[in-house]
């Protein structure tokens, strides 16, 4: 359909006995087709649960699957044709009930597969839960992730099909793994590690003169930098004196910055600014 999205929805009850609360659980499956002539804004807003976002096998067709306790959650799925915006929400009816119910009753799952040819403005918001974003091979122009608490894994196993203007990752409490970030092909990136453990792997296919900022609060952080990329890095922060730093010996300090030995000889460079907090920081190259 020209300049529109076609959504085919089917709603069905999950088969009896699957989760032990079959009277409450609902499954939603949607297939959609988008136009590739302008960027598609995707807003995925999930209060709690398991979230998976990955690449569809089709250039302009995607899908959405949800499973949730209808007594605990409500959904809203909407496409604004004028704004070319796809909005998906899985909303918790009551956080009080969530804290007092069993894990089975609180269970929810959201799986969004995105078409790889559509240029995407992807905004993912998850308050609490397990978030897995497999974003390699998509065409993401802008990407943001906001997570309050839980486990986060973001990976770019394949290069982004377009240059990413900006990447913003804010994970406040929990364990965060960011893999092959170079394949995102970002020009600018802002990463907030919050409280917990952060593993950020800046390897892959970089754009020329990429810039990234990493802000650490409390916890352990491990950052991996590629050996085949020119690096300029600044490590500071108001509470930097409270952190233990272990920086790879191949990076040498000149003035306020650390440099790779070949920095002045390469056109492809990564400028990295790290603000440390209370905890440990380890920087390796591989």
Image (tube, rainbow, N blue to C red):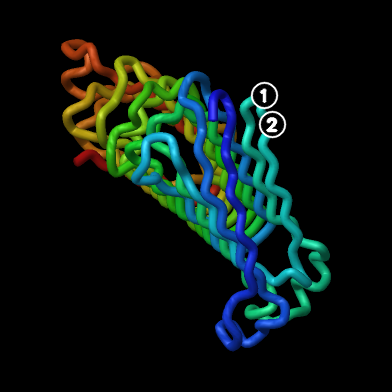
Helix or strand or loop: what does disc 2 sit on?
strand
Q: Does residue 59 lie above or below 71 as drawn?
A: above
The residue tagged 1 is 83
In the image, residue 254 lies at what x, y percent?
30, 18
Q: Residue at x 54, y 35 (%)?
A: 122
Q: Residues within 10 Å of mark 1 (few under 14, many from 20)?
A: few
- In the image, taking residue 246 as reference, residue 7 lies left or right, namely right
Q: Residue at x 32, y 23 (%)?
A: 270
Of the 4 image quadrants, the one containing the N terminus is top right
Q: Does residue 57 lie above or below 173 as drawn?
A: above
Asked if the residues shown at circle 2 and circle 1 are in contact, with their CB atoms under 8 angstroms apart, the answer is yes
Q: Residue at x 37, y 48 (%)?
A: 222
Q: Nearer the viewer, residue 273 or 172?
A: 172
Q: Does residue 11 lie above or below 229 as drawn?
A: below
Of the 4 image quadrants, the one containing the C terminus is top left
Q: Residue at x 39, y 49 (%)?
A: 199
The residue tagged 2 is 80
Helix or strand or loop: what does disc 1 sit on?
loop
Q: Nearer the viewer, residue 65 or 279?
A: 65
In the image, residue 134 lies at what x, y percent?
39, 48
Q: Residues within 10 Å of mark 2 (few under 14, many from 20)?
A: few
In the image, residue 104 lies at what x, y percent?
63, 80
Q: Nearer the viewer, residue 231 or 236?
A: 231
Mark 2 to mark 1: distance in Å? 6 Å
Label count reads 2
Picture quadrant where residue 267 is located:
top left
Q: Nearer the viewer, residue 70 or 232?
A: 70
Picture quadrant where residue 187 is located:
top left
- In the image, taking residue 136 as reference, residue 79 lies left or right, namely right
């Amino acid at each position: 359909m020209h300049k529109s999205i076609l959504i085919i929805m089917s709603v069905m009850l999950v088969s009896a006995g699957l989760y032990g609360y079959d009277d409450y659980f609902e499954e939603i499956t949607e297939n959609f087709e988008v136009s590739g002539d302008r960027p598609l804004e995707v807003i995925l807003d999930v209060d709690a649960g398991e979230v998976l976002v990955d690449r569809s096998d089709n250039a302009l067709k995607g899908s959405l699957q949800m499973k949730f306790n209808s007594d605990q959650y409500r959904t809203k799925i909407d496409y604004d044709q004028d704004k070319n915006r796809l909005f998906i929400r899985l909303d918790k009816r009551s956080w009080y009930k969530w804290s007092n119910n069993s894990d089975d009753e609180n269970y929810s799952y959201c799986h969004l597969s995105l078409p790889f040819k559509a240029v995407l403005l992807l905004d993912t918001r998850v308050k609490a839960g397990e978030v897995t974003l497999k974003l390699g091979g998509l065409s993401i122009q802008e990407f943001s992730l906001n997570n309050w608490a839980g486990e986060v894994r973001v990976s770019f196993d394949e290069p982004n099909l377009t240059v990413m203007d900006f990447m913003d990752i804010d994970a406040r409490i929990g364990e965060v793994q960011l893999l092959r970030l170079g394949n995102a092909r970002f020009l600018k990136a802002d990463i907030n590690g919050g409280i917990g453990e952060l593993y950020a792997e800046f390897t892959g296919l970089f754009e020329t003169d990429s810039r990234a900022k990493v802000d650490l609060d409390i916890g352990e952080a491990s950052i991996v930098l590629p050996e085949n990329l020119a690096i300029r890095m600044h490590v500071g922060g108001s509470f930097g004196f409270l952190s233990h730093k272990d920086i790879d010996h191949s990076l040498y300090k000149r003035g306020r910055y650390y440099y790779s030995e070949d920095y002045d000889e390469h056109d492809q460079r990564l400028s990295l600014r790290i603000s440390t907090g209370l905890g440990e920081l380890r920087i390796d190259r591989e």
